[in-house]
Image (tube, helix red, strand yellow):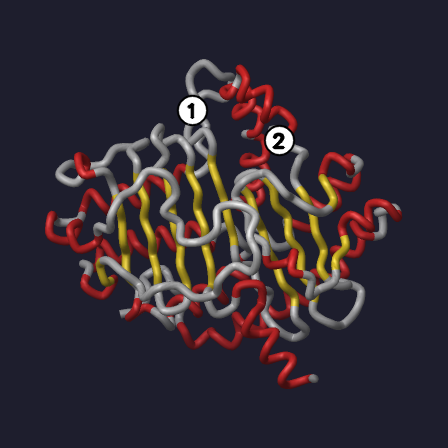
Amino acid sequence: MPLLFFPDPTFAAEQQRGAGEGAKSSSPAFGGFLSTLNEDQRGDAFYAFDDEERFDLRLAPMGLEGLQVGDMSDAQWRELESFFGSILSPVGLAKMNTIRSLEVEVAELEGGLIGLLMDRFRNPKRYFLAVFGNPAEEGAWGLRFDGHHLSLNWTWVPDKPLVVTPVFWGGQPRAVPEELERSGLRVLLEEESVAIGLINGLSKEERQIAHVPFTHGSNIRRPMFVSGDVPLTLDEPRGLARKNLSRAHQKQLDDIIEIQLGNFLPAIADYYRLRITAQEDSIRFAMSVPEEAMGRSLSQGDSLYYCIQGDAFIIEYDNTSEEADHIHVVWRDLENDFGHDILAEHLATHH
C-alpha cells in the first residue's frame, strides 16, 4: 500500500526534473547575497568543498564556524533570508526564524549564574553561514546554516536534485511559559501533537512492540556536540512495522513524515516523498516513554522519544530531558546525507 499522502509514483521523473531545476536555479539567486560580502565576510563564510567542516552536525551552540548573522548588515540578512525562501516553504522559513528568536526566552529563563555564563551564546543573531565550494562555478557546492537548535545542510550537484539532509530543528522552551510575553508559543507543536495522537490510538500490544528502552537525555543516535564526519549508517529499523498498522494509523504515521517534508518547497518535498515511498515496506515506528506512562494516554509535554526509520531514512524526535522542555528533531537520508550518493555518481560519470 503506498503512503497515503503520496502523489502518483508515475510523476517520479517529472518531480525529479523539477527538483533538479530548482537546485540549478538557486546558484544565481544566491549570487545576489554573495556579491554584497566584503573581503572579511567572505573569509569567514567560504570553505573548500571537501573541508571536513562540511560534515559537522551540532546541537549545542558551541564551536560554530562561518559568517555570523550578527556580522551581516540588515540588508544582507534580508537578501540571505530571501534566498532561504527559495528552498524552505513559508512554514519552514517561519520555523527557522522562530527557533532563532527563542534564544531571547532561553536567556530569560536561565538567569542566575548559568544565565551569566551562557549569555554570549543566547543571541538570535548568533547563527552562522558556511559556504563550501564556489556557487559561481559549475561544480558541486554546499551550504550550512546553523546555531542553537538549528542545522540546515544543503548540497548542490550539477543536474541533480537538491540535497537538503541532514536537518536538525530544536525547540527550547517546548512551550513558552505564562510569565513571558510570548506565552504558549510552541515552535514544534505538530511534531509533538501528531505523534501523541498516533501513540494514544495504538493498542496495548502495538505500544509494547513499538516501545524501546527509555533514558533521560537524548536518545538520538548521532553525536550531540561538535563531531567529525556524521556516520551514514545506523542499526536496522526497530519497532512497529508500518505495513502492520491500520489504514488510519498509517495515515497518522505518514502525517508525521509530511511535517518534515513540508518545511521545504513542493518540488523538493515531492522528490523526498518518492525516496521514502520506495522504502515503505521497511518503515518502522519506535517510541519510548517513562515506565509510568506506558499504561496511560500521553499528554502534551510528557517525556517522549520516537523514531520513524526505513532502509535509508530516519526521523527522530527527542524530548526526554528531566523537565521534558527541550525538543530535538533530526531528519537524515542515510544514502545521501551531504549529497553522498549523488556526488559519487556525478564523479563516476563526469570525472
Q: Residue at x 65, y 66 (%)?
A: 156
How would you rate the neighbour count of disc 1 (Cα within 10 Å): few for under 14, some for 14-19, many for 20 or more? some
Q: Secondary structure at mark 2?
A: helix
Q: Name the one closer to the observer, 276 or 172.
A: 172
Q: Amino acid at mark 2?
A: Phe
Locate residue 32, reporting x and y percent: 80, 52
Q: Name the one closer to the observer, 309 or 158.
A: 309
How would you rate the neighbour count of disc 2 (Cα within 10 Å): few for under 14, some for 14-19, many for 20 or more? some
Q: Mark 1 or mark 2: which comes first in sequence?
A: 2
Residue that numbered label 1 is attached to: 184
Q: Is residue 225 left or right of residue 137?
A: left
Q: Is residue 89 shown to the viewer in this render?
A: no
Is 126 above or below relative to 79? above
State the quadrant of the N terminus: bottom left
Residue that numbered label 2 is attached to: 121
Q: Is residue 89 left or right of residue 319?
A: right
Q: Residue at x 39, y 43 (%)?
A: 218
Q: Residue at x 40, y 59 (%)?
A: 314
Locate residue 279, reporting x and y percent: 35, 70
Q: Name the one closer to the observer, 87 or 203.
A: 203
Q: Is residue 82 left or right of residue 238?
A: right
Q: Amino acid at mark 1?
A: Gly
**Residue 325: quarter of image:** top left
Q: CA distance from mark 1 to mark 2?
A: 24 Å
**Residue 159: quarter of image:** bottom right
Q: Which mark's residue is nearer the viewer, 1 or 2?
A: 2
